């Protein structure tokens, strides 16, 4: 039987619930901190563009600003998952939400180094808020479903904020973008009162630390590579449009349309969580990503360019919910699953950094080849992990 046939024959859900079942209000409340923590990621281009237009950050500092906050966020999410007891969640969410809101407001009026420092500090509450959400997803009986719900809610919220920025930025500039982020952070605080007070402890063999085993780390590395690929190509969307003979309006249209398709991708993944095995989802997504990026390498029409980016956006969200089940198969203790959000955030942060070494001012197509190579490497790793897991299950 082929690997695809065996994957189709296996149950799509391999996780088990950890701890008592949460109520609908508790589940909804746990999604809010993660949405708040990642809102900036969906509108980062608008925020950084406004800062550059106002000469508050240099071109080099723009990339540093985005990378520093994301790196700190990923490290904090992973550290909290490994070492922070999942207790006093309501208090933690309130303090973190308030800290993030204050840092957003403090960024208003800041320039150059002050902005870098404030956004780096913002990565700390960002990471803790995301840890609260991923804690619920990793402990659920159907992690792909709740990851899909989370990613769909996140992308819908990012789309609303992005559309609001169309009105905010011309009137209030970069300060308006940070004011809106601060308001959303404070608005999310009341939801903390509906959070569960704590999560059940994760299963941990006696004498072992809270860190994942080696197979868990390998699975996390694979997800990091795939998210790095998406970030490496995505950051150069507008230059790729220009080199295809298209103007900036086409690139901006491609961004908004892609967000709609991302919502569709996350929604479809949520619906298929019970029916589709994670490995099949990975293969479909990898092929879709490569197809979309391949079209970027040619002089295509505006319609084809927007369609290609929509395909990339759809597949980027479609694969997201299945990352947690992939890590759970590699590490059934759920410790790698708890680290998955941090690995994905780190991948999104370092992807543009990797791409900066393979592009030039007049030719950024190197980012496409880097993206394909990273996806291929990530898929090779997850295929090896899946084959190993299948062999283990066949062994008496």
Image (cartoon, grey):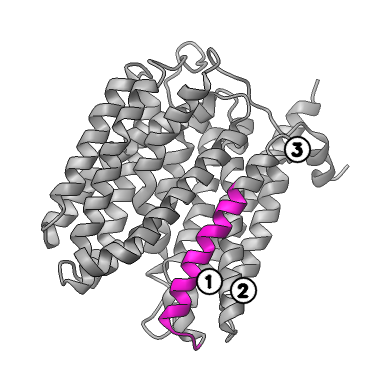
Question: What residue sits 15% from the left and 67% below the top?
Answer: 56
**Quarter of the image containing the C terminus?**
top right
Where is 236 relative to 288, above or below? below
Where is 77 relative to 58, above or below? above
In this rendering, does residue 207 appear at all? yes
Cβ–Cβ under 8 Å for marks 2 and 1: yes
In this rendering, does residue 60 appear at all? no
The CA span between labels 3 and 2 is 30 Å
Residue 212 picture location, percent across and down: 48, 29
Residue nearest the viewer, comparing 63 with 212: 63
Question: What residue sits 55% from the left and 39% below the top?
Answer: 149
Q: Main secondary structure of the magenta part?
A: helix
Residue 332 picture location, percent across and down: 60, 25
Quadrant assignment, res 387: top right
Question: What residue sits 16% from the left and 56% below the top?
Answer: 115
Residue 68 picture location, percent across and down: 27, 52
- Residue 141 in the magenta stretch? The answer is no
Residue nearest the viewer, comparing 205 with 298: 298
> Which mark, by number, is residue 181?
none
Q: What residue is pinned by disc 3?
A: 275
Q: What residue is pinned by disc 2?
A: 294
The CA span between labels 1 and 3 is 32 Å
Q: What residue is pinned by disc 1?
A: 368
Quadrant assignment, res 113: bottom left
Mark 2 closeness class: few <14, some 14–19, many ≥20 residues within 10 Å? some
Mark 1 closeness class: few <14, some 14–19, many ≥20 residues within 10 Å? many
Where is 144 relative to 295, above or below? above
Question: What residue sits 17% from the left and 41% below the top?
Answer: 102
């Amino acid at each position: 039987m082929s690997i695809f046939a065996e994957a189709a024959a296996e149950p799509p859900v391999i996780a088990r619930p950890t701890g008592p079942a949460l109520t609908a209000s508790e589940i909804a409340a746990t999604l809010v901190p993660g949405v708040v923590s990642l809102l900036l990621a969906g509108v980062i281009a608008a925020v950084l563009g406004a800062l550059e237009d106002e000469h508050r950050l240099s071109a080099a500092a723009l990339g540093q600003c985005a990378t520093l906050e994301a790196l700190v966020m990923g490290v904090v999410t992973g550290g909290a998952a490994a070492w922070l007891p999942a207790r006093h969640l309501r208090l933690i969410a309130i303090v973190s939400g308030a800290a993030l809101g204050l840092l957003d407001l403090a960024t208003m009026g800041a320039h150059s180094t002050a902005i870098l420092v404030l956004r780096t500090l913002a990565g700390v509450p960002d990471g803790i808020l995301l840890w609260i959400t991923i804690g619920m997803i990793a402990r659920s009986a159907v992690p792909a479903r709740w990851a899909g719900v989370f990613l769909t809610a996140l992308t819908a919220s990012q789309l609303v904020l992005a559309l609001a920025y169309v009105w905010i930025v011309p009137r209030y500039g970069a300060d308006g973008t940070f004011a809106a982020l601060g308001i959303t952070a404070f608005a999310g605080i009341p939801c903390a009162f509906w959070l569960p007070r704590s999560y059940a402890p994760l299963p941990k063999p006696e004498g072992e630390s809270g860190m994942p085993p080696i197979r868990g780390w390998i699975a996390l590395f694979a997800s990091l590579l795939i998210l790095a690929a998406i970030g490496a190509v995505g950051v150069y969307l507008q230059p790729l449009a220009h080199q295809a003979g298209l103007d900036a309006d086409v690139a901006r249209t491609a961004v908004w349309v892609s967000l709609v398709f991302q919502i569709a991708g996350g929604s479809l993944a949520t619906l298929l969580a019970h029916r589709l095995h994670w490995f099949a989802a990975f293969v479909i997504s990898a092929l879709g990503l490569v197809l979309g990026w391949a079209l970027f390498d040619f002089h295509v029409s505006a319609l084809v360019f927007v369609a290609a980016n929509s395909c990339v956006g759809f597949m980027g969200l479609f694969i997201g919910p299945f990352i947690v089940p992939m890590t759970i198969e590699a590490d059934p203790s759920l410790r790698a699953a708890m680290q998955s959000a941090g690995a994905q955030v780190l991948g999104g942060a370092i992807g543009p950094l990797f791409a900066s070494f393979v592009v030039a001012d007049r030719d950024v197509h190197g980012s496409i080849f880097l993206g394909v190579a990273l996806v291929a490497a990530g898929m090779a790793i997850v295929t090896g992990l899946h084959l190993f897991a299948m062999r283990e299950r066949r062994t008496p």
